[in-house]
Image (spheres, helix red, strand yellow):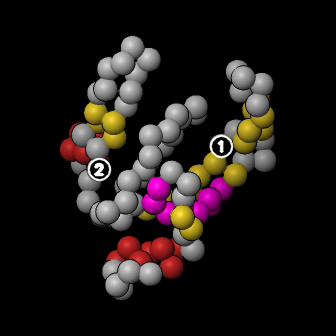
Amino acid sequence: MHADTTADRLIHALGLQPHPEGGYFRETYRSNENVRCSDGRVRSASTAIYYLLRGSDYSAWHRIRSDELWHFHAGTPLDVHVLTADGRRPACHASPWQSA
């Protein structure tokens, strides 16, 4: 573990584990209902997680197949980068969506 920082305390207090795409997480909710995806896979209708990135961490590029809701609790702002099917790379900068 790194020096005793706010992030370290949160990781410990919330029981977060390393996330495969980077950062730390813990699932806090999983629906009892399932849905069938367009590719035939069956998955939970909804899940919720705590997710934490340290300043030196990153979330690896990954495909999101479901809607996501983000709740910003603490820390510094982050930018979300998107790669569209036609190759555009718009970025959702922190100020519009994290300042509410």
Of circles 2 and 1, the one toward us is 2
Question: Is the residue under label 1 in contact with that under label 2 (CB below 8 Å)?
Answer: no
Measuring 51% from the left and 79% from the top, which residue is drawn there?
13
Q: Main secondary structure of the magenta part?
A: strand
Mark 2 element type: loop
96 relative to 32 in the view: left or right: left
Q: The magenta stretch spans which residues? A: 22-29
Measuring 24% from the left and 40% from the top, which residue is drawn there?
93
Identify whether 32 is placed above or below 87. below
33 relative to 64 in the view: left or right: right
Quadrant hosting residue 43: top right
- The answer to which of marks 2 and 1 sits earlier in the sequence is 1
Measuring 44% from the left and 46% from the top, which residue is drawn there?
60
Q: Which residue is mark 1?
A: 46
Quadrant hosting residue 57: bottom left
Front residue of 50/85: it is 85
Identify whether 52 is placed above or below 78. below
How far across and how far down the image is residue 6, in percent?
35, 77
Residue 61 is marked as: none
Residue 78 is marked as: 2
How far across and how far down the image is residue 18, in percent?
54, 64
Identify whether 11 is placed above or below 98. below
Q: Residues within 10 Å of mark 2 (few under 14, many from 20)?
A: some
Farthest residue in the top direction? 86
Amino acid at the residue labelled 1: Ser
Name the quarter where the N terminus is drawn.
bottom left
Identify whether 76 is placed above or below 9. above
Q: Is residue 3 visible?
A: yes
Amino acid at the residue labelled 2: Leu
